[in-house]
Amino acid sequence: MSNSTSTAFRYLFPFVDLSARQWAFEARLLRWLTLIWLLVGLIVLFSASYVVADAEQGDGLYYFRMQILWVFVGLIIFNTLTHIPIKAVINASQLLCVAVFVLIVATLIPGVGLTVNGATRWLLIGPVSIQPSELIKPLLLLQSARIFGLWNHIRLDIRLGWILFFVVITGCILMQPNLSTAALCGLVIWCIALASGLPLKYISSAALSGFAVATLSMGLRDYQRRRLVSFLNPWESPTGDGYQLVQSLLAIGSGGFWGAGLGFSYQKLFYLPIQYTDFIFSVFAEEFGFVGTVFLLLLLLLYATIGLRVALRAAQPVHQLLALGAILLLVGQSILNIGVAAGLLPTTGLPFPLMSYGGSSMIGSLAVAALLVRVARESCGAEVVSLS
């Protein structure tokens, strides 16, 4: 088939990429695992959102249809990024990073940002709301991998400028307030810096500073302290601060070994809050049980294993750090979401990548997955493009 026909398929049918047959094995496997993960997420979202959408929107398929639209857009971005050299993506991402940072700042302007449940994390652009803090994740990943991967080849003023930029971005996200996303972004940047071999004195200072800021944030915001206390003993206030976690635990426990079956979750019937976003795993566990949960964990484990293999085989430090950061953002965030739903971690607002409802999260997650696939293409058999 001609190149023009293949390109048409790639954009008109973004789940089809005929050129993938020539990719390295790791790249092809990561692509298929991403699509499987995405399919599982759509199935669970359909079940988790139907009743709520019918009650809130008068259309049970409302959230599912919107998610399909975002998946279509995300897959176009995914397929595009897998065909662009990492060097070109990193260069283009510098300006995009500044642009999305401006959007994050805009959410803090009274009357501009859209407030939901006490947090101003969204911007309303026409009929569409976007969450810039989700879109910034792949851009921060690219720039942190570049800065720390080429640390000894970059001028001191540029290094300090980008470090300050990272700090300001996470600070603005924290002010929305969005402690969980700010902490995740900071943690990913910190882990990339640690993996790059940065001197331990810098790493430890950054860790202490981050811990101090998180402690200060919880000291200033009463709801964050209450979340921490309710996480330790949710049954002390099962109808108050511990309500979300109690309902999540009931959903997971009700799944048993085989699960209640697709569509037969009881807790999603207006007992479990935000069941199609933050607590979508609870619905999954109730409907697919222990067996389904093990399958999902094995999928995440396989994804992480292949991703780490790609990182270890990469010849360039920037590629290694990019692959590592992608695994942290996709698999690490998934584990955090599961930990919150299972009561192992304090309740946060982190979505489950490729599963939770939300266009910004879907686009950001597919962009991160595409970067990992692209690293696999360039590091596991394809032509390597120099970054220096």
Image: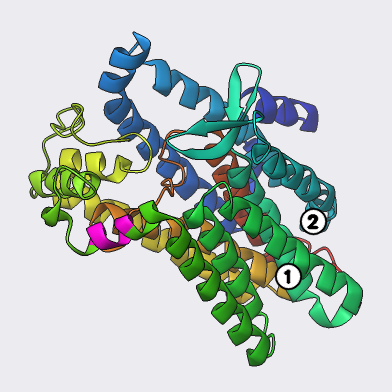
Screen quadrant of the N terminus? top right
Q: Secondary structure at mark 2?
A: helix
Q: Which one is nearer the viewer's eye here, 157 or 111? A: 111
Q: Is residue 25 magenta?
A: no
Q: Secondary structure at mark 1?
A: helix
Screen quadrant of the C terminus? bottom right
Relative image position of residue 222 (x, y in whole percent):
38, 55
Q: Which one is nearer the viewer's eye here, 162 or 79? A: 162
Residue at screen point 63% across, 68% down:
189
The region drawn magenta spans 226-231
Residue at screen point 65% across, 71% down:
320
As measured in the structure, the alpha-carbon distance from the residue carrying label 1 to the one carrying label 2 is: 10 Å
Residue at screen point 24% across, 48% down:
241
Quick one: label 2, few (<14), some, or many (20+) residues within 10 Å? some
Q: Is residue 270 visible?
A: yes
Relative image position of residue 112 (x, y in whole percent):
67, 30
User: Relative to residue 187, is residue 5 depicted above or below?
Assistant: above
User: Relative to residue 161, is residue 95 depicted above or below?
Assistant: above
Quick one: label 1, few (<14), some, or many (20+) residues within 10 Å? many
As drawn, the label of residue 90 is 2
Q: Tell which circle, 1 or 2, labels the residue nearer the N-terminal end.
A: 2
Q: Is residue 209 left or right of residue 217?
A: right
Q: Is residue 60 left or right of residue 167?
A: left
The residue labelled by disc 1 is 318
Q: Which one is nearer the viewer's eye here, 350 or 322? A: 350
Relative image position of residue 242 (x, y in whole percent):
21, 50
Three-letter code, disc 2? Ile
As drawn, the label of residue 252 is none
User: Relative to residue 374, is residue 203 depicted above or below?
Assistant: below
User: Relative to residue 218, is residue 155 depicted above or below?
Assistant: below
Q: Dots 1 and 2: beta carbons under 8 Å?
A: yes
